[in-house]
Amino acid sequence: DAGVIQSPRHEVTEMGQEVTLRCKPISGHNSLFWYRQTMMRGLELLIYFNNNVPIDDSGMPEDRFSAKMPNASFSTLKIQPSEPRDSAVYFCASSLAGTGTTFFGQGTRLTVV
Amino acid sequence: TQLLEQSPQFLSIQEGENLTVYCNSSSVFSSLQWYRQEPGEGPVLLVTVVTGGEVKKLKRLTFQFGDARKDSSLHITAAQPGDTGLYLCAGLYTGTASKLTFGTGTRLQVTL
């Protein structure tokens, strides 16, 4: 199994631009999570989906952030417009609900200049 | 807000030393997990503890869940350079289903 696949691994963009992060969860997993990690705030849950349905988006910082899961094998996290304070490593993770084991991707390091 | 505090934040030790990392909360967990994260990678699950007072061992790593299920510790015996990384505890609180809340992290460096 290839694990959770995220793209791109690195993204550098200018303030005000739209950024789209992509995630392919592990096949068969029905829960998908988007996390953000910074030195100051650690690892924060932004949103999670069960069976492609958003369950809890209370961690999404503001309306500039949106996430979709059009099918069981793909999810996107979009930031529009991006700001320098959005610079962080964004992780996607997936699990099979009830197993208690969450698998993380390698992350996307986003830098907004 | 449910907070998970880890201590210490940073730890630099020499190979062969023992160490303990702590994870504390004011709330009760339904279960707690420990992860290790290496630079440029995502966190990797080490262990899950569920029962108050539970102790689990993974080679030189010993994990303990507090009796009241509000705290946990990770003890490493005879640390090796390969143990270097960021150690994160993560709690599942009763009623939050799949929602893991991560601790503040402990960055461990083991030198020769």
Image (cartoon, rainbow, N blue to C red):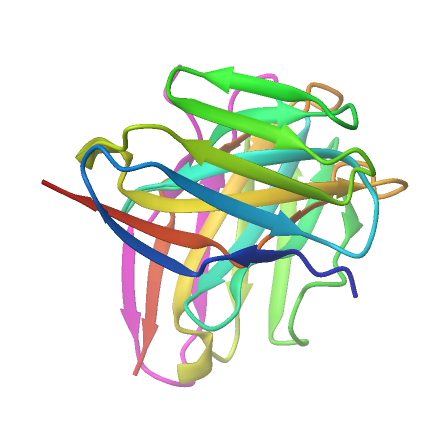
- Which of these two is toward me, A103 or B58? B58
Please state if A5 lies on the left or on the right of B51 as rendered: left
The answer to which of A99 and B2 lies nearer the viewer is B2
Q: Position of residue A24 (x, y in %)?
A: 48, 34
Where is residue B91, by image quadrant?
Answer: top right
- The spot of residue A45 in percent (x, y) is 63, 55
Q: Front-most of B77 and A46?
A: B77
Quadrant including the C terminus of chain A: bottom left
Q: Kindly identify the residue that appears in the image at 52 percent across and 31 percent down.
A: A25
Question: Is A68 drawn above or below residue A81 in the view shown?
Answer: above
Answer left or right for A105 relative to A28: left
- Asked if residue B62 can be seen in this view, the reply is yes
Q: Quadrant of the N terminus of chain A?
A: top left
Q: Residue at x 60, y 17 (%)?
A: A28
Q: Residue furthest front?
A: B17
Residue at x-position 60% and y-position 76%? A64
- Above or below — where is B95 with respect to B54? below
Membership of A3 in magenta stretch: yes
Report the side of A64 relative to B8 (left or right).
right
Q: Is residue A103 above or below residue B37?
A: above
Q: Which residues are magenta?
A: A1-28
Locate residue A5, reporting x and y percent.
Answer: 40, 34
In the displayed image of the protein, which residue is found farthest to the right?
B95
Q: Is residue A83 visible?
A: no
Q: Total of numbered circles in the picture?
A: 0
Asked whether residue B91 is drawn in magenta, I would say no
Q: Position of residue A22 (x, y in %)?
A: 45, 47
Q: Quadrant of residue A75?
A: top right
